[in-house]
Image: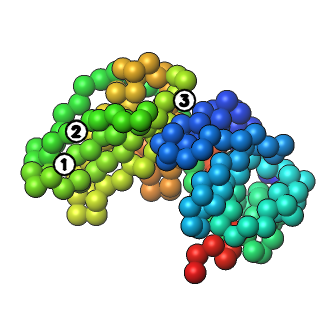
Amino acid sequence: MTEVLKTPHTATVRAWVDGWVISRNVPRPVPEPWGLRVDVGLPGHVSRHIVTVPTPETLHRLTATLTTPGTWLKLCACAPDVAPFLPEEWAVQDPEYMMTASLTRGTFRAPPGYTLAVTTRAGVTAARLLTAAGEVAARGQFALAGRTAVVDQVETAGNHRRRGLGTVIMRTLAGTAASLGARSGVLVATAQGQALYETLGWTLHTPVTAAVLKGAIP
Protein backbone atom coordinates (compact mmCIF):
# COMPACT_ATOMS: atom_id res chain seq x y z
CA MET A 1 0.00 0.00 0.00
CA THR A 2 1.28 3.48 -0.87
CA GLU A 3 2.08 5.61 2.14
CA VAL A 4 0.75 9.10 1.50
CA LEU A 5 1.37 10.41 5.01
CA LYS A 6 3.11 9.15 8.09
CA THR A 7 1.16 6.58 10.06
CA PRO A 8 -1.58 8.39 12.01
CA HIS A 9 -1.05 8.76 15.73
CA THR A 10 -3.19 6.17 17.48
CA ALA A 11 -3.85 8.62 20.32
CA THR A 12 -5.25 11.22 17.90
CA VAL A 13 -7.56 8.71 16.26
CA ARG A 14 -8.67 7.42 19.67
CA ALA A 15 -9.41 10.97 20.86
CA TRP A 16 -11.53 11.56 17.77
CA VAL A 17 -13.54 8.40 18.41
CA ASP A 18 -13.92 9.14 22.13
CA GLY A 19 -15.24 12.63 21.42
CA TRP A 20 -17.42 11.51 18.51
CA VAL A 21 -19.38 9.06 20.64
CA ILE A 22 -20.09 11.80 23.19
CA SER A 23 -21.13 14.20 20.45
CA ARG A 24 -23.48 11.64 18.88
CA ASN A 25 -24.71 10.17 22.20
CA VAL A 26 -23.83 6.59 21.30
CA PRO A 27 -22.07 3.86 23.36
CA ARG A 28 -18.39 4.08 24.16
CA PRO A 29 -15.99 2.46 21.67
CA VAL A 30 -15.03 -1.17 22.13
CA PRO A 31 -11.43 -2.26 21.43
CA GLU A 32 -11.03 -4.83 18.66
CA PRO A 33 -7.90 -6.53 17.27
CA TRP A 34 -8.04 -4.17 14.26
CA GLY A 35 -8.90 -0.97 16.13
CA LEU A 36 -12.16 0.29 17.63
CA ARG A 37 -15.83 -0.61 17.19
CA VAL A 38 -18.71 1.76 17.90
CA ASP A 39 -22.20 0.27 18.11
CA VAL A 40 -24.18 3.18 16.69
CA GLY A 41 -27.47 1.31 16.39
CA LEU A 42 -29.13 3.44 13.69
CA PRO A 43 -30.82 2.32 10.48
CA GLY A 44 -28.13 2.32 7.81
CA HIS A 45 -25.45 2.87 10.46
CA VAL A 46 -25.51 -0.18 12.69
CA SER A 47 -21.87 -0.01 13.71
CA ARG A 48 -18.58 1.49 12.63
CA HIS A 49 -15.10 0.05 12.76
CA ILE A 50 -12.19 2.49 12.93
CA VAL A 51 -8.87 1.16 11.65
CA THR A 52 -5.73 3.25 12.07
CA VAL A 53 -3.49 0.95 10.00
CA PRO A 54 -5.68 -0.79 7.40
CA THR A 55 -3.37 -3.41 5.95
CA PRO A 56 -4.62 -5.80 3.24
CA GLU A 57 -4.62 -8.62 5.79
CA THR A 58 -6.71 -6.59 8.23
CA LEU A 59 -9.21 -5.63 5.54
CA HIS A 60 -9.56 -9.23 4.39
CA ARG A 61 -10.22 -10.37 7.96
CA LEU A 62 -12.71 -7.56 8.58
CA THR A 63 -14.72 -7.96 5.40
CA ALA A 64 -14.85 -11.72 5.88
CA THR A 65 -16.13 -11.28 9.42
CA LEU A 66 -18.58 -8.40 9.11
CA THR A 67 -21.83 -9.41 7.40
CA THR A 68 -24.51 -7.03 8.71
CA PRO A 69 -25.70 -4.43 6.16
CA GLY A 70 -25.25 -0.94 7.50
CA THR A 71 -21.82 -1.72 8.95
CA TRP A 72 -19.30 1.02 8.29
CA LEU A 73 -15.53 1.03 8.01
CA LYS A 74 -13.53 4.16 8.76
CA LEU A 75 -10.05 3.53 7.38
CA CYS A 76 -7.12 5.88 7.96
CA ALA A 77 -5.87 5.81 4.37
CA CYS A 78 -6.79 7.20 0.99
CA ALA A 79 -9.21 5.30 -1.19
CA PRO A 80 -6.71 4.09 -3.84
CA ASP A 81 -4.76 2.34 -1.08
CA VAL A 82 -7.69 0.44 0.41
CA ALA A 83 -10.47 0.16 -2.18
CA PRO A 84 -8.75 -2.66 -4.10
CA PHE A 85 -8.93 -4.81 -0.96
CA LEU A 86 -12.66 -4.25 -0.33
CA PRO A 87 -15.16 -6.70 -1.86
CA GLU A 88 -17.69 -5.20 -4.27
CA GLU A 89 -20.49 -5.28 -1.69
CA TRP A 90 -18.67 -2.55 0.23
CA ALA A 91 -19.54 0.91 -1.14
CA VAL A 92 -16.68 3.41 -0.85
CA GLN A 93 -17.86 6.91 0.07
CA ASP A 94 -16.55 10.36 -0.81
CA PRO A 95 -13.07 11.17 0.56
CA GLU A 96 -12.75 12.47 4.11
CA TYR A 97 -9.88 14.14 5.92
CA MET A 98 -8.90 13.95 9.59
CA MET A 99 -7.50 17.33 10.57
CA THR A 100 -5.90 18.73 13.71
CA ALA A 101 -5.10 22.17 15.11
CA SER A 102 -3.68 23.82 18.18
CA LEU A 103 -6.34 25.80 20.03
CA THR A 104 -6.12 29.23 21.64
CA ARG A 105 -8.61 31.28 23.58
CA GLY A 106 -10.42 34.12 21.93
CA THR A 107 -13.59 36.18 21.90
CA PHE A 108 -15.86 36.24 18.90
CA ARG A 109 -18.85 38.24 17.77
CA ALA A 110 -21.69 37.39 15.47
CA PRO A 111 -21.84 39.12 12.08
CA PRO A 112 -24.49 41.86 11.67
CA GLY A 113 -27.96 40.37 11.50
CA TYR A 114 -27.11 37.28 13.56
CA THR A 115 -26.97 36.32 17.22
CA LEU A 116 -24.32 33.91 18.53
CA ALA A 117 -25.50 31.35 21.10
CA VAL A 118 -23.18 28.91 22.88
CA THR A 119 -24.67 26.19 25.09
CA THR A 120 -23.39 23.04 26.79
CA ARG A 121 -25.46 19.97 27.54
CA ALA A 122 -24.44 16.40 28.42
CA GLY A 123 -20.81 17.09 27.63
CA VAL A 124 -21.50 18.63 24.21
CA THR A 125 -20.91 22.33 23.57
CA ALA A 126 -22.80 23.75 20.60
CA ALA A 127 -22.39 27.11 18.88
CA ARG A 128 -25.23 28.49 16.77
CA LEU A 129 -25.70 31.61 14.70
CA LEU A 130 -29.35 32.62 14.75
CA THR A 131 -31.28 35.02 12.54
CA ALA A 132 -33.62 37.64 13.97
CA ALA A 133 -36.45 35.18 13.35
CA GLY A 134 -34.69 32.47 15.37
CA GLU A 135 -33.64 30.39 12.36
CA VAL A 136 -30.38 28.46 12.75
CA ALA A 137 -28.14 29.84 10.02
CA ALA A 138 -24.99 27.95 11.02
CA ARG A 139 -23.99 25.59 13.77
CA GLY A 140 -21.33 23.24 15.09
CA GLN A 141 -20.44 21.39 18.26
CA PHE A 142 -17.60 19.74 20.13
CA ALA A 143 -17.01 17.24 22.91
CA LEU A 144 -13.86 16.95 24.97
CA ALA A 145 -11.69 13.84 24.99
CA GLY A 146 -9.08 14.72 27.58
CA ARG A 147 -7.25 17.82 26.32
CA THR A 148 -8.59 17.34 22.79
CA ALA A 149 -11.75 18.97 21.45
CA VAL A 150 -13.52 16.83 18.88
CA VAL A 151 -15.39 19.13 16.52
CA ASP A 152 -18.48 17.69 14.86
CA GLN A 153 -21.53 18.50 12.75
CA VAL A 154 -20.41 21.90 11.47
CA GLU A 155 -22.84 23.16 8.85
CA THR A 156 -24.26 26.31 7.32
CA ALA A 157 -27.79 26.55 5.94
CA GLY A 158 -27.83 26.84 2.16
CA ASN A 159 -29.32 30.33 2.07
CA HIS A 160 -26.71 31.67 4.50
CA ARG A 161 -23.53 30.43 2.85
CA ARG A 162 -20.62 32.57 1.61
CA ARG A 163 -21.06 35.02 4.47
CA GLY A 164 -18.25 33.81 6.71
CA LEU A 165 -20.59 32.10 9.16
CA GLY A 166 -18.66 28.85 9.13
CA THR A 167 -15.52 30.73 10.10
CA VAL A 168 -17.30 32.35 13.06
CA ILE A 169 -18.61 28.98 14.21
CA MET A 170 -15.21 27.30 13.96
CA ARG A 171 -13.40 30.08 15.77
CA THR A 172 -16.06 30.13 18.47
CA LEU A 173 -15.79 26.38 18.99
CA ALA A 174 -11.98 26.53 19.10
CA GLY A 175 -11.88 29.44 21.51
CA THR A 176 -14.54 27.97 23.78
CA ALA A 177 -12.80 24.61 23.86
CA ALA A 178 -9.49 26.27 24.73
CA SER A 179 -11.15 28.13 27.61
CA LEU A 180 -12.28 24.73 28.92
CA GLY A 181 -8.73 23.38 28.88
CA ALA A 182 -8.44 21.84 25.42
CA ARG A 183 -5.03 22.23 23.82
CA SER A 184 -5.77 20.68 20.45
CA GLY A 185 -8.67 19.95 18.16
CA VAL A 186 -9.48 17.13 15.79
CA LEU A 187 -12.24 16.67 13.23
CA VAL A 188 -13.06 14.72 10.10
CA ALA A 189 -13.95 16.92 7.15
CA THR A 190 -15.38 16.59 3.69
CA ALA A 191 -13.35 17.96 0.79
CA GLN A 192 -15.38 21.18 0.95
CA GLY A 193 -14.87 21.49 4.69
CA GLN A 194 -11.16 20.82 4.39
CA ALA A 195 -10.72 23.93 2.26
CA LEU A 196 -12.31 26.11 4.95
CA TYR A 197 -10.48 24.53 7.86
CA GLU A 198 -7.10 24.94 6.18
CA THR A 199 -7.65 28.70 6.06
CA LEU A 200 -8.20 28.58 9.85
CA GLY A 201 -4.94 26.78 10.58
CA TRP A 202 -6.11 23.17 10.63
CA THR A 203 -3.74 20.67 9.00
CA LEU A 204 -4.22 17.23 7.53
CA HIS A 205 -3.47 14.38 9.91
CA THR A 206 -4.61 11.50 7.71
CA PRO A 207 -6.99 10.88 4.83
CA VAL A 208 -9.98 8.77 5.82
CA THR A 209 -11.85 6.36 3.58
CA ALA A 210 -15.36 5.36 4.62
CA ALA A 211 -17.08 2.27 3.23
CA VAL A 212 -20.48 0.80 4.05
CA LEU A 213 -21.76 -2.72 3.54
CA LYS A 214 -24.54 -2.45 0.95
CA GLY A 215 -28.14 -3.33 1.61
CA ALA A 216 -28.51 -0.96 4.54
CA ILE A 217 -30.79 1.61 2.94
CA PRO A 218 -33.95 0.50 1.06
Numbered label attached to residue 145? 3
Dot 1 amino acid type: Leu
Is 101 placed above or below 82 here? Answer: above
In the image: residue 24, left or right of residue 164: right
Is 98 placed above or below 70 here? Answer: above
Residue at the location (41% across, 35% down)? 122
Distance from the alpha carbon under mark 3 to that under mark 1? 28 Å
Asked if the residue under mark 2 is in contact with the one under mark 1, i.e. CB atoms within 8 Å, the reply is yes
Dot 3 amino acid type: Ala
Compare marks 1 and 2 and give the one earlier in the sequence: 2
The picture places residue 60, in percent across and down from the top left corner, at: 87, 60
- State how the image is colored: rainbow
Residue at the location (34% across, 34% down)? 120
Numbered label attached to residue 130? 1
SS category of the residue bearing label 2:
strand
Distance from the alpha carbon under mark 3 to that under mark 2? 23 Å
At label 3, counting other C-alpha atoms closer than 10 Å, the crowd grade (few under 14, some 14-19, many 20 or more) is: some
SS category of the residue bearing label 1:
strand
Q: Nearer the viewer, residue 130 or 120?
A: 120
The picture places residue 44, in percent across and down from the top left corner, at: 59, 67
Is 119 placed above or below 74 here? Answer: above
Residue at the location (23% across, 63% down)? 159
Q: Nearer the viewer, residue 47 or 96?
A: 47
SS category of the residue bearing label 3:
strand
Compare marks 3 and 1 and give the one earlier in the sequence: 1
Distance from the alpha carbon under mark 1 to that under mark 2? 8 Å
Residue 86 visible to the viewer: yes
Residue that label 2 marks: 117
Dot 2 amino acid type: Ala
